[in-house]
Amino acid sequence: MASTAMTPTESPSGGEVSFENLYPALIECFVVILCGYVAGRLNIISTTEAKGLNTFVGTFSLPSLIFMSMATLDLSSVNWQFLLAILLAKASVFIVVLVITLLVTRPVDMSKSGLLAIFCTQSNDFALGFPIVAALYSKSHPAYPSYIYLMAPISLVILNPIAFLFMELGRRRAEMTSLNPEITDSTDSNRRTSSNYQRTESTSYLILSILVKVLFNPVVFMTTLGIVGNLVFHQQLPIILEGILKVFGSAFSAAALFLLGLRMVGQMHQLQGANLVIPCLLICVKCLVLPIVTREFVAIIDAGADANETVDLSNFGFLYGTFPTAPGVFVYATHFGVDVDLVASAVTAGTFLSAPLMFISAKMLTLTNLNPSNYLQDLDSFLFDISIISLIATAWVIGIFIVGRKCNKIPHFFTLCLVVSQFLGCFGVILWSSLGCCDKTWQLYLQFIFISVGVFGSRLWTALLALALYFLRTRSLCFVLKLRPWFVGIGWGIPAVIATVLLSTVDTETDHAQKSDPNFQYGQTQAIVAVVILISSFLITVTCLIMQQRYGKKYNEYQSLRIDDESDHASDPTPTRSTPSVLDIEDFGNILRRNGRSRQREETTGLLAPEISAEEDLPNESSTDLYSASEAEGGASEFCSSPNCDVTKQQQCVQIVKRYNSTPTEPEEAICPTDPNEEYQILRHIVLLLILSCSMFVGIALCMWTIIMERVSGIYLELLFFDGVLNYGQGFLVCMIFGFDNKLIVSPIMKRWRQFWDGAKSLVLPHSDAISSETKLTCEQFRTYHMNKCIADLVRDKRRRLKTYRSVFTGSELVNWLIMVGLARDRLEALRYGRHLVDGRVIKHFKSEYHFHDQPYFYTFLTAENMSNVST
């Protein structure tokens, strides 16, 4: 790293980046956007009027501005290598998003893959990007704003047509499947040959029509026409023509930003719960991954005439990548009918979330050739503050896992190891910040051990957690339990070995006279080790997420079929007995005893609880029984699911899982364990892995930059601080995901509030004299006409771990039943109906702790109260 200091606002090429113009430009842009949003929200401008404004902007104003800019541009000064780098960066992200979407969607959704690829690569170049670039570079690099007009066709002419082809083929495939599902199963060879010929001809016509539409797109057409005009008029337009174009072009900025605000009205309603995952992931790829990839490609190609110009261009490429997605992607989604709500919400959220990133990146562009000693003190205090917050958050999560008895649960055991490694890393940073003089003392070695074991361990445990979720979904719980000791050895052993090797070998070659970045205390050697760990963990995590998503689609289809089948059986008016909803270990043991040999049967009988009698055995089809057992809890196999798994291995798995289930795992709770997301918290773990994958990607870019960097720039400093947030702030993110447990936090607070307000811990219902007439009428009608059928359809003995809950049903099951039989039109009306039944003493929560909720809480009919005791 160079230690030469320069004036912070002076670029290495001698120009000065006008940061003072950026802040007003950003405010102007977003104020106009806000005005458009308010006008649309208050219906000052209707949808029809907005369409007219859109036509003016897209057909007249923007094409005029593009033509004038292209016709007056000095083409001899254009850096075509820089444009090549932009093309390669966008194409790389485009292809990766396209392929990954094709892999994870089942059935394959070509339309969605093309749309998401456009979303991650097409920037809002003209309405939002051009004013910011003009404000920053109008003095130092006057040609940079004109590059916007040359970079836009990269998406519009080269990449988008590929996506349009995928989207059109996906739409036609869906139409053909819906209209004639047997079109591919024709037995007539002549018809098959004719169909193939027509399909080939149709595809060729489709490609030709897409190319024609692209060429006559106003932006593409005027870009080409502007280049022709540049050659004809020699960069000097006629005065009359230039005046007309200026009038149209000057109206573009305000109209486009105002229109952007109009399009945001009513587009944020989808950003709730699980629907947040995909938009947030797309925004991260567009505003975080694309800038880093663009900067790396510009640096690798060495696009500038010298090192200084390459730095300027790479910084400009990074800023360009932070621009949000263009609103035109929403138009594409609407035209093809693909994920319209998702894209609209993501475009809106991305526009506002990109504002601080653009502002910070622009500010960092003004800092070049920094001396590390100038920012190290700020980094020290920043990481110290982040680590204090994260340390408290990780301690809270560890406490939640311990009190909630999730320490031994799968996959929460691996999550706990991840949190502990994050705790160690934060503690090491706190020790590092407290060191004054960096002499070779035991404190120096101690903080390095904590940091290296914590940081490397958190990366490895992320990959191991992804592997555990994948095997839990595709193999079995037994398989994961067998791997757990190996995972523990890898997760803690490798970081310990790395720390020991670095301390014993590289430490003697390192100068500790001055404090350095805690991530790179041993210089490039530690950076190389970190790159290897990061790349390995990142690839494993992403691969497991993709494969798990592919398997999850198949499993969800199976689950829907199984639920339909169970509903058919539940509707049988003459049920012979109560069937457990979950096949437990004792049931599985009975299957093995029925199919095993006598010696194995005697050994197994002594180990398994003889709670289920022979009369209560399941049906005789052992293969069906085994398959049901493999899908019992959480959507994953509990037992050995390999085709080569014999009776002996199955019995071993039974014992392993029985020992696992016999240990205290969590407090007794009225929640049915049949939902995999409830049992294993799959969605929360996937969100955590996605966040940690982004952290690892930033870490990879930072380490590679550290290895090849000759001087410290502002963008490097931005990545350094951002990596500090994503690395040492992981504990806070984990706390947001797992730190507010409903059983340990929300429910106890509600109980204490009920005790304080009502003077009782249990649910207090209104007195019989205070029950409303509506409630009385609803309960009377239900008892007379519907209760017997409801009991026959829903009431079952349900098993939770080693406990049996007699004659219960869940709140969600009753809601589904009320809608199915027509007593409620939707879930909200069914929820009100269920509350009437609770107030009228028809049903109750089996512990009398909750009112009626559309949740997997156990409820029972008061007429069958004598059977609702819990037995162990």
Image (cartoon, rainbow, N blue to C red):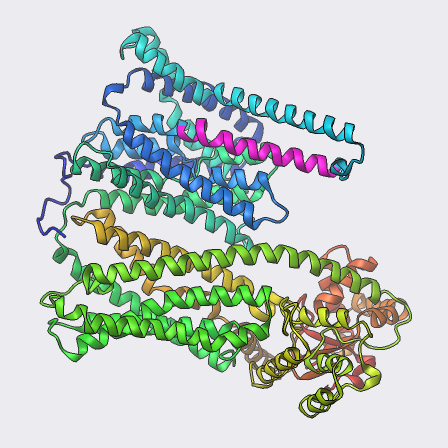
Secondary structure mostly taken by the magenta-highlighted segment of the chain:
helix
Name the image quarter holding residue 799: bottom right
Residue 122 vertical placement versus 197 (above, below): below
Q: Residue at x 21, y 50 (%)?
A: 708
453 on left or right of 52:
left
Whether residue 657 appears in this view of the structure is yes
Q: Quadrant of the C terminus?
A: bottom right
Q: Residue at x 26, y 55 (%)?
A: 720
Residue 24 vertical placement versus 438 (above, below): above
190 on left or right of 711:
right
Name the image quarter holding residue 753: bottom right
Which region of the structure is painted magenta?
A: 154-178
Whether residue 392 appears in this view of the structure is no
Tell me where residue 183 appears, x and y as whole percent: 75, 35
Q: Residue at x 52, y 34 (%)?
A: 163
User: Residue 157 in magenta?
Assistant: yes
Nearer to us in this view, 71 or 196: 196
Tell me where residue 521 appears, x and y as whole percent: 19, 65
Tell me where residue 250 appears, x and y as whole percent: 35, 21
